[in-house]
Image (tube, helix red, strand yellow):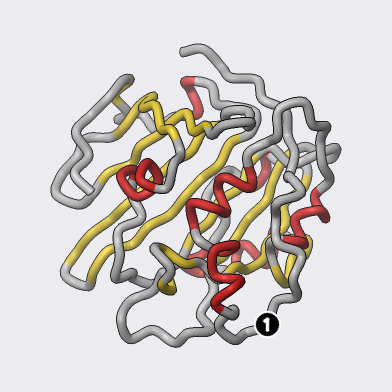
Amino acid sequence: MKAYNLLIAVVSLLPTCAFSDSVPLNSEKSKFELANVVRGLLVDKGSSGTQYLDLKKLVRNLHYFTNDENAKAGSTFFPGDYNRYGKIYRGEIALFVNGKRFLGENMEDQYSWIVYVAGPNAAPSTLYITSDKTVAASGGPSYFRKAGLTLQPIACSSVSGGNYDGYFIVSAPGKRSAILQIRESSGSGGSWYSYGLFWDGLLTNDLPKDMEVGDCAIND
């Protein structure tokens, strides 16, 4: 599969407000809407690159993530190969889906998702958003498409019920494309989501071995 070489940048649309543990004001909710976060992370056409610490505009408590900390992270450990990257940073973000906190019905409002930013020493190439808590809303491909993002399937895992792992070329007007990973796991306790955004693209050997290249039926 062709590797997609994409520039890396964080655009000026990213929120600059201060973060706290409380629920953002109504006027700020749209900035932390999951689809808007992904759209904001796409590179503006014609823009230059960025630095790791530029993501402090979006992610709170962003700090250098050591291998020792990764070993103690439990279920929210770094999803990729830690030793593959020159730098990894960890932080938190409050997410919304359709204007409501992206949480299970009984979760506390101040709960935040974990964000990992990784890449070579010069600039980030990969971003993960993950959580060990269930959610009460859908954050799958249909949600992103309804929000105005274009998703072109690249590959996916075998779909069984609400369990899938899909990779898409994600794009929006005025933006450079990137690769978006959407993973959902469902069980008796609810649904879990995790996301990956790859500005520099992926090689085929970066995909899990059970991936099928092309479209697949994801019912989300």
Q: How many marks?
A: 1
Q: Using the rendered view, name the quadrant where residue 198 is placed.
A: top right
Q: Left of 193 or right of it: where is 13? A: right
Measured along the vertical axis of the image, is residue 140 above or below residue 180? below
Pick the front one: 131 or 107? 107
User: Which residue lies at the image location 82% right of the left edge and 55% below the top edge?
Assistant: 53
Where does residue 74 sit, x and y in percent of width and height? 50, 69
Q: Using the rendered view, name the quadrant where residue 68 is placed.
A: bottom right
Where does residue 186 sit, x and y in percent of width and height? 23, 59
Crowd rating for badge 1 (residues with CA inside 10 Å; few <14, some 14–19, many 20+): few
Farthest residue, direction front: 27
Residue topped by disc 1: 20
Pick the front one: 139 or 83? 139
**Can residue 132 be seen?**
no
Pick the front one: 78 or 50? 50
Q: Left of 193 or right of it: where is 61? A: right
Measured along the vertical axis of the image, is residue 22 above or below residue 181? below
User: Which residue lies at the image location 15% right of the left edge and 44% below the top edge?
Assistant: 160
Where does residue 38 sit, x and y in percent of width and height? 55, 48
User: Which residue lies at the image location 60% right of the left edge and 62% below the top edge?
Assistant: 31
Measured along the vertical axis of the image, is residue 63 above or below residue 214? below
User: Which residue lies at the image location 67% right of the left edge and 25% below the top edge?
Assistant: 6
Where does residue 36 sit, x and y in percent of width and height? 54, 53
| Amino acid type, mark 1 | Ser
Measured along the vertical axis of the image, is residue 22 above or below residue 166? below
Give SS at disc 1: loop
**Can residue 143 be seen?**
yes
